[in-house]
Image (cartoon, helix red, strand yellow):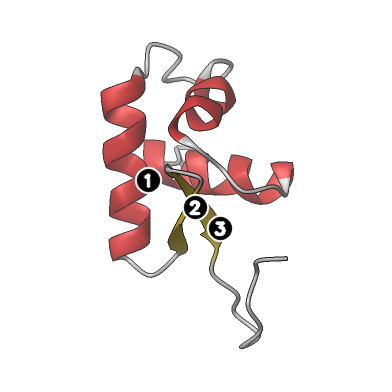
């Protein structure tokens, strides 16, 4: 049986592959071609917050919008 990634694992991999800060709207776009194509704004927002709580993403507020950045595993800040 093949290992099926969870929705959040898939989203995290898509964010890493995309390489830019992610907003809820971008997370929705990244999920459009996934097995969870019906993922809406609310689910994307919850997934981003969950990944941040797990320490995998760092949230910042820029011009009134929340953005998430990958948390570095090398000890360096992933933000520009």
Q: Which residue, given by chain and number where applicable, does mark 2 sit on?
A: 68
Q: Residue at x 60, y 75 (%)?
A: 72
Label ID, residue 48: 1
Disc 1 crowd, CA 10 A, few/some/many (<14, 14-19, 20+) = many
Q: Which residue is mark 3?
A: 69
Dividing the picture into quarters, in which one does residue 24 lie?
A: top left
**Circle nearer the N terminus (3, 1):** 1
Q: Which of 11/77 is in front?
A: 77
Distance in Å between CA atoms under marks 2 and 1: 7 Å
- Element type at mark 2: strand
Marks 3 and 1, how far apart in space?
A: 10 Å
User: In the rendered view, would you say 27 is above or below 68?
Assistant: above
Give the CA separation, mark 2 to mark 3: 4 Å
The x, y position of residue 44, in whole percent, is 36, 31
- Nearer to us of marks 2 and 1 is 2
- Location of the C terminus (image quadrant): bottom right
Residue sitting at 72 percent across and 49 percent down? 19
């Amino acid at each position: 049986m093949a290992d099926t990634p969870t929705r959040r694992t898939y989203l995290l991999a898509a964010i890493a592959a995309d390489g830019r800060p992610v907003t809820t709207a971008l997370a929705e776009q990244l999920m459009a071609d996934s097995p969870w194509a019906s993922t809406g704004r609310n689910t994307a927002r919850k997934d981003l917050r969950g990944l941040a709580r797990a320490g995998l993403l760092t949230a910042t507020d820029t011009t009134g919008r929340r953005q998430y950045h990958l948390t570095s595993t090398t000890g360096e800040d992933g933000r520009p």
